[in-house]
Image: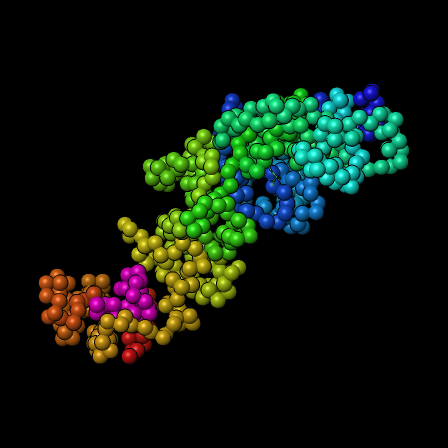
């Protein structure tokens, strides 16, 4: 068979060669060791936390090596495509500060010299590389229909042999030029298949950056390289693109490991050096003591959108993901509490080969910590930003007097040990609720261990001595001053020495006041709360009786 003639028959309009593209997209001039990595999502409109995780790994790999992180959109499956998915991906990434230096920047813009960065715009390039494979005898057209393929599988199952299109089952492998020409003249649709020379008894070895040495049988299947609509499936598209875009490291989910032999073979037949591969294991969760993959169907936290809806601070989510990405991150963070994430010495080698465990409670702790370190103004800005989208009532309250709201967030914030009450912005409403009569639950519930008369007596006595101009010491002295006449002691030690002698101590008295004012037993500094509420409101709340 004259393969050149065949290639011209199939792709008469392709006049360039892969070598021409190598000139258009020359090797990048980067420092030694710089990694070129890409995030290559399909625009399906749904971003899994695993996607965000892998984009973060891309960015860390590029940043820590002075390399390049670019965004490529793999839109070869038009059926799964969602209209605004690209915006969704870009805004999702940028809200976490994962901003590509190159590639797709919006639905319509891209930057960089290695584009187009949308696969649907690269068909001519794919056809050029496919044409070369045909010329070398490594690819051929296949005219089998769905029915032919199904019949093949049926027969293979009957015979108990491996299913698929390979070896003697690959009917179109041996078509003559004349037979092919006839199909083409009839306008029959065709796919281009790889003519695999693989031997299932031979092994390929790949040294994965994360998983280490992978040993697998060679590929024997005549995989489809170009579909009948002219678009390549993932395997071929990524090989061509990662070569021309000069990717050094392909970071991707480990669901691709099983097709690695095909990917390696495609590179081999194209005469290309395969990039290094870093296969990330899926993020796992503990479910009833069993480790399982975080599931899009079962776990709301699998979706990146979930974190925005709940109002997790992006910085906290990132910190958490860093911790599950690299086992030494937490130690590094302790030693460098204020350092920028970009200065973390990220390494593929420190990633879990079996799958990082995702723990929401741990995430909450990390986020509480992150929020506790923010300024009151930052907390205000984030909270009102979240509320604008997700809670109009909170938005209106916080916006009605921003100085007042910032004062709320200042309470106990700049202490040596700031409180860690909030892990997400959706918790702010509850946190501030007693400062706003519109949402304050006035159905006050006092702890059951207080007698009604004592509660009423404490509130009455305190209302008489309360003075909004007192400083903190005077305030506390005043609270102590009402203890003894009511049968309580101002002295906690004294109480502990002989509890039967008293109804309680000053802490109990302040609890009653705290509950009357806030309807909760645990709050930040009560003195600051009273100050902020102001005299009229405090007196009104102290007038409650049970
Ligand atoms: N488009 C593929 C996906 O979304 C990308 C895999 C890769 O990163 O190579 O799964």
Main secondary structure along the magenta-highlighted residues: helix
Residue 227 seen in this snapshot: no
Residue located at (43% from left, 55% from top) = 424
Q: Quadrant of the N terminus?
A: top right
Residue 224 coordinates in the image, percent (x, y): 71, 33
Quarter-wise, where is residue 403 in the image? bottom left
Residue 339 coordinates in the image, percent (x, y): 39, 38
* Position of 288 relative to 337 (above/below): below
Quarter-wise, where is residue 132 in the image? top right
Residue 48 seen in this snapshot: yes
Q: Nearer the viewer, residue 224 or 505?
A: 224
Residue located at (78% from left, 30% from top) = 171
Residue 30 coordinates in the image, percent (x, y): 55, 25
Residue located at (70% from left, 34% from top) = 159
Q: Nearer the viewer, residue 451 or 459?
A: 451
Q: How many marks?
A: 0
**Residue 524 magenta-drawn?**
yes
Q: Quadrant of ligand 1?
A: top right
Colour setting:
rainbow
Residue numbers of the magenta segment: 508-530
Lateral position of residue 443 relative to residue 155, left or right? left
Residue located at (17% from left, 67% from top) = 505
Q: Quadrant of the C terminus?
A: bottom left
Residue 545 coordinates in the image, percent (x, y): 28, 79
**Residue 443 magenta-drawn?**
no
């Amino acid at each position: 068979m004259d393969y050149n003639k065949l290639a011209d028959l199939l792709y008469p309009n392709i006049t360039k060669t892969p070598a021409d593209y190598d000139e258009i997209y020359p090797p990048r001039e980067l420092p030694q060791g710089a990694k070129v990595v890409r995030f290559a999502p399909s625009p399906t409109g749904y971003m899994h936390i695993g996607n965000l995780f892998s984009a973060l790994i891309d960015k860390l790999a590029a940043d820590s090596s002075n390399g390049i992180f670019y965004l490529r959109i793999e839109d070869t499956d038009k059926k799964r495509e969602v209209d605004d998915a690209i915006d969704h991906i870009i805004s999702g990434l940028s809200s976490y500060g994962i901003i590509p230096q190159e590639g797709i920047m919006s639905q319509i813009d891209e930057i960089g010299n290695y584009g187009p960065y949308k696969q649907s715009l690269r068909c001519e390039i794919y056809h050029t590389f496919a044409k070369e494979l045909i010329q070398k005898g490594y690819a051929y057209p296949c005219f089998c229909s769905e029915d032919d393929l199904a019949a093949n599988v049926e027969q293979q199952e009957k015979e108990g042999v491996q299913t698929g299109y390979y070896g003697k089952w690959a009917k179109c492998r041996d078509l003559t030029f004349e037979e092919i020409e006839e199909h083409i003249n009839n306008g029959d649709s065709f796919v281009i298949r790889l003519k695999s020379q693989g031997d299932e008894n031979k092994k390929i070895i790949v040294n994965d950056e994360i998983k280490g040495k992978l040993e697998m049988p060679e590929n024997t299947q005549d995989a489809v390289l170009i579909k009948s609509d002219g678009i390549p499936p993932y395997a071929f598209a990524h090989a061509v693109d990662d070569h021309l875009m000069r990717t050094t490291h392909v970071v991707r989910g480990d669901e691709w490991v099983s097709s690695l032999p095909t990917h390696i073979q495609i590179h081999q037949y194209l005469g290309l050096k395969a990039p290094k591969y870093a296969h990330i294991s899926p993020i796992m969760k503990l479910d009833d003591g069993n480790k399982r993959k975080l599931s899009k169907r079962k776990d709301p936290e699998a979706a990146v959108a979930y974190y925005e809806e709940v109002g997790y601070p992006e910085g906290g989510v990132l910190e958490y993901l860093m911790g599950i990405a690299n086992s030494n991150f937490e130690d590094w963070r302790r030693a460098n509490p204020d350092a920028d994430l970009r200065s973390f010495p990220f390494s593929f080698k420190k990633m879990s080969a079996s799958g990082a465990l995702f723990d929401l409670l741990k995430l909450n702790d990390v986020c509480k910590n992150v929020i506790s370190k923010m300024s009151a103004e930052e907390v205000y800005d984030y909270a009102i930003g979240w509320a604008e989208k997700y809670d109009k009532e909170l938005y209106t309250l916080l916006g009605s007097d921003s100085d007042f709201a910032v004062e709320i967030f200042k309470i106990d914030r700049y202490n040596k040990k700031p409180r860690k009450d909030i892990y997400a912005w959706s918790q702010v409403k509850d946190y501030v609720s007693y400062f706003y009569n519109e949402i304050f639950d006035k159905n006050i519930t006092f702890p059951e261990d207080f007698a009604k008369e004592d509660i009423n007596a404490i509130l009455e006595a305190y209302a008489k001595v309360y003075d909004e101009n007192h400083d903190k010491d005077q305030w506390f002295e005043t609270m102590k001053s009402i203890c003894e006449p009511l049968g309580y002691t101002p002295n906690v030690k004294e109480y502990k020495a002989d509890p039967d002698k008293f109804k309680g101590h000053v802490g109990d008295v302040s609890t009653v006041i705290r509950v009357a004012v806030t309807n909760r037993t645990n709050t930040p500094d009560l003195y600051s709360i009273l100050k902020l509420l102001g005299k009229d409101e405090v007196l009104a709340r102290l007038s409650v009786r049970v």
